Every structure is written in C-alpha cells, then in structure tokens.
Amino acid sequence: MYVWDWTCNTFENAFPWLIVLVYLEFLELNCISGLAMAVRRVAFASPVACAARNALKIERVATDSAVISWATPSPPPTAAYIVKYATSRLATRQPRAALRNLTPGASYKLDVARADTGEPVASGTLQMTAAEPAEPAVELPLTELSRLEIRVGVIRTVERHPDADTLYVEQVDVGEGEERTIVSGLVKYCSAEELTGRRVLVLCNLKPRAMRGVESRGMLLCASNEEHTDVDPLLPPPDAPLGELVTFDGHRPAPIDPGNRATKAFDRVADKLSCGPDGVAKFEDVPFMTESGPCTSPKKLVGPVS
C-alpha cells in the first residue's frame, strides 16, 4: 500500500506520480484539457503545493522593508505570482518580491499564489525589525551670544538727524508689522541713497536709548576696517526673509527681552565679532548664519563688527 501523508510531511513512493503525469499528458494530447486541469489541481494540491508553501525564504529584513523569495515548481509557471500581506497585494513575475512601507516591529502573514489559478505557492511569517530609538537631541549651551536678537531687516527711509550732523534716522522693517526707528552714525560712510532699500542686520534687543532727542530701538550691525575709516553695513543673503533670526552654530538661540541684560550680553561678546578676508561675519570662528547662508560684508572689510 502506498501511504499518502496529507500533512505534507512524506509521500513514501514516487511511482504513483509517474502514473499521474503520464495520464495528464494523455489527457492534454487528446484535447481533454478541462479534465487534465481538474486532475492536476487534485493531484498537486497537497504534497507538491505543501512543499512549496514551506519554501518561503526571507532574504533580507530592514526597518520598513523586506525581500522574500520562494521555490518554484519545475518547470516554473509562466504566469505572475500574487503576494498577499496585511491588506496589500503585490504582483511579480519572478519568484522574488521586495515588500516596502512595512511597519517596524510588526509581524506579517505572507501568502504567495499563482495569479492565473490562485494555486498556493508559498506562505510564511515575516517579523520586521524594530525601529531603533532615536538619539536624544543634544541641547546647545546657553551663552551670552544666545541672548542676542539679531534679525534680518530692510531700511525703508533715511533722514538726517535734525540735531546731529553725523547721524541718520532710519525707519527699518524687521518683519514686525511696524517699522523701528534706528539712529546710526553712518553719515560719513554711506549716503542716504545708498542706505535706502538696503537689507541689513539689526540688533533688536538692546535697551532703547535717546540719541540727541530721538529714541533708537536697535542698532545696525556694520563691518569696518581696522582704522575705522571705512564702514559697511552687514548684508544678509538675498533669500533670507525679513525678521529671520540670525543664529550661531553651537549656541542655543534664546533671545531675551530688550533691556540692560541684553546690552550687557552684547558688550561681553562685541570684541569677538569680526569679518575676515572672505567677507563673512563671525563670532570668533562661527559665522552669522541664516537658513539661506552666512551674512557678509559686501566690501569684504577686514576688521571688527559693531
């Protein structure tokens, strides 16, 4: 007696399969293809299909993707395969599939079948790799530079100070909805026409102070040469929006309210602000940065920033 194990573990004699194969060839040669297909489904539904279903191989698993493959009958079918997992279906003509957009750490039941007949080919379970915990963000140190509020602005109007020949009174827009009045001593270095419409950097949180009767609410940051015979207002990148906060790598941006404390913070870092031959404004070796790039001296003046 030939023992047929329907649990897919053993089939103790291969001779009956030769009889089945010969019978199938006879049916197909005599154009009885429907009966041949029926016999094929019954005959191959258990041991051969079960052997294939146990052949699912997990080739590679990443956090949110995996590559699987499976054994194919000989000769392999010409139709496509359908891979089912969760609520997804993937068609492939190769006995191999790349599964994407999977959930890290999840477990998936995989079923592979022929697309033309629905005949099971392989099955198995895929365990995804758990996502590695994100490294905690390193908090930057709070420094005197952190306390300064330096923002991108544009000079809207420029007038001579009514009571001081060396001073300008500028109306500067730093994206607050209301222009700031700033008094600067640039008369000897820049014409009013040169300054009108110019993009600048404004130190916004100095304590407001009256300069010959006009209250100034900030300071234009400028580069100068060592002799202080040439002065050049610093220029932000053209794409930097009005009001953008200038930052410094390695220093936590944490501007404080205008007042004496902010003025003291500026006094403590002022002698370390400068421009080098490349024209980039820096605190020590750290550039004045915006999202669009560093701030510069258009004239590339080498000397202090104040």
Image (spheres, grey):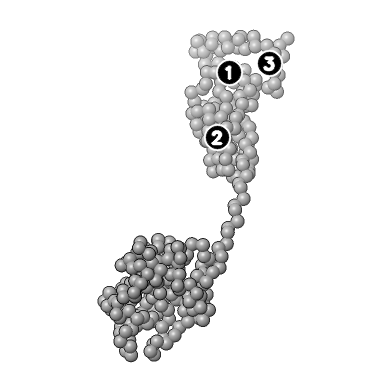
The kind of residue tagged 3 is Phe
Q: Nearer the viewer, residue 287 or 290?
A: 287
Picture coordinates of residue 133 (x, y %)?
Answer: 62, 50
* Labels 3 and 1 touching (C-beta < 8 A): no
Q: How many marks?
A: 3
Q: Tell which circle, 2 or 1, labels the residue nearer the N-terminal end.
A: 1
The kind of residue tagged 2 is Val
Q: Which residue is mark 1?
A: 40
Q: Tell which circle, 2 or 3, labels the residue nearer the N-terminal end.
A: 3
Q: Tell which circle, 3 or 1, labels the residue nearer the N-terminal end.
A: 3
Residue 233: in sight, yes or no?
no
Picture coordinates of residue 147 (x, y %)?
Answer: 51, 72
Q: Nearer the viewer, mark 3 or mark 1?
A: 3
Position of 30 compared to 197: left or right?
Answer: right
Q: Quadrant of the N terminus?
A: top right
Which numbered disc covers residue 18? none
The kind of residue tagged 1 is Arg
Q: Which residue is mark 3?
A: 11
Question: Secondary structure under badge 2?
Answer: strand
At 56% from the left and 65% from the top, the residue drawn is 141
Picture coordinates of residue 112 (x, y %)?
Answer: 57, 30
Question: Secondary structure under badge 1?
Answer: helix
* Labels 2 and 1 touching (C-beta < 8 A): no
Question: Secondary structure under badge 3?
Answer: loop
Q: Quadrant of the C terminus?
A: bottom left
